[in-house]
Image: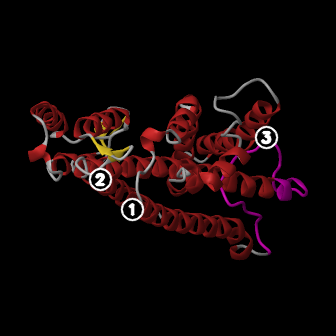
Amino acid sequence: MQKFDWRSMIKMNIVVLRCVGLWPSGEESYKPGVYTIYASTVLTLFLLGHIFFQAVNVYFIRNNLSAVTGTIYILLIEILLVFKVYYLVKNMTVLKQLLKMLETEMFQPRNSTQINEIQADMKFWQMLIRFLWVSVMCSNLFWAIYPLVDNAGKEKRFPFLAWYPYDAQKSPYYEITYVYQTISVNYMSSIHVSVDALAGALNVYNGNQFDILCDNLRNLHRLTKNGTIDAGRNFRYCLKHHKHILDLKLQSSKIFYATFESDWIEFSEEVKKELIFFVMRTQKPVKLSALNLFYLNLDSFMRILKTSWSYFALLHQISNRNS
């Protein structure tokens, strides 16, 4: 069977990351060279610089609650991006090694059924990412043109409130600053979407690996090598595969059931004992955590949404009272 290309789904995503300075060539992280200088320059100019000018401006507008609440939300999102970039760069070598591991035989689909399942998941992921890109680009376009349309002929405004060490209202400083803010927000948005898309793709890959493992377990009595069936060898292959997978909760919970969907009654006593130990290890589904602080699941997501809405409602109420 032809080798399955796992990188095809994230090919464009990697191109974007490389353009923004977050994907050095090769299988390792940054090395001294032109690309490292380029990455440092664009990150400092369009990410850290933009955040710095907005953060300083918070001090000057600290007595204007409405302006502070309008700025702090965007500023916190931009600061969050700094952490995304930091952890991406920190784990760059590991990420590239994981992508390289997917090309090995251990992680390859073994039949057309598995390939069809993988491709279905890929299409759904790609649809979501396209929708996210369109939404982000539309938002950026709105931010770029709204100050010009809303305040035409009056005071010169920028897409974002920020402080600059020069009179930004004078021409050509105003035009240069306006373009700088527009480039910066598009640059940061590209990083946001690309990093999130990469994380989402890795999760899809994880789920695919569990689907492959479950299908292999169901067919322990059918998998052949050189025209012969060896249930013990097939199971040890699945056990090795399971050890190499970065686990997810939903898909990993299926392993318990998939193990017994094979024709295990006819297996030897040795294989049956190995199956029992394997099932005991897989009864507890795996979970992803955020910095070991809390698990990533639907309940955590709903609590975050409820808390965010509560803070927004409080700030909105305070803002209305002061207006």
Q: Which mark is residue 6?
A: none
Mark 1 and mark 2 in contact (Cβ < 8 Å)?
A: yes
Q: Is residue 166 magenta?
A: yes
Identify residue for label 2: 215
Q: Is residue 133 above or below residue 59?
A: below
Residue 58 horizontal side relative to residue 269, left or right: right
The secondary element bearing badge 1 is classed as: helix
**Segment tinted magenta in the rendering:** 153-176
Q: Is residue 254 magenta?
A: no
Labels 3, 1: front one? 1
Tell me the CA gap for discs 2 and 1: 11 Å
Labels 2, 1: front one? 2
Q: Quadrant of residue 47?
A: top right
Mark 2 and mark 3 in contact (Cβ < 8 Å)?
A: no
In front of the other: 243 or 290: 243
* Mark closer to the chain start, 3 or 1: 1
Identify residue for label 3: 165
Identify residue for label 1: 117
Tell me the CA gap for discs 3 and 2: 62 Å
Task: Give percent across and percent down for residue 171.
Answer: 90, 58
Residue drawn at (74%, 36%) of the image: 39
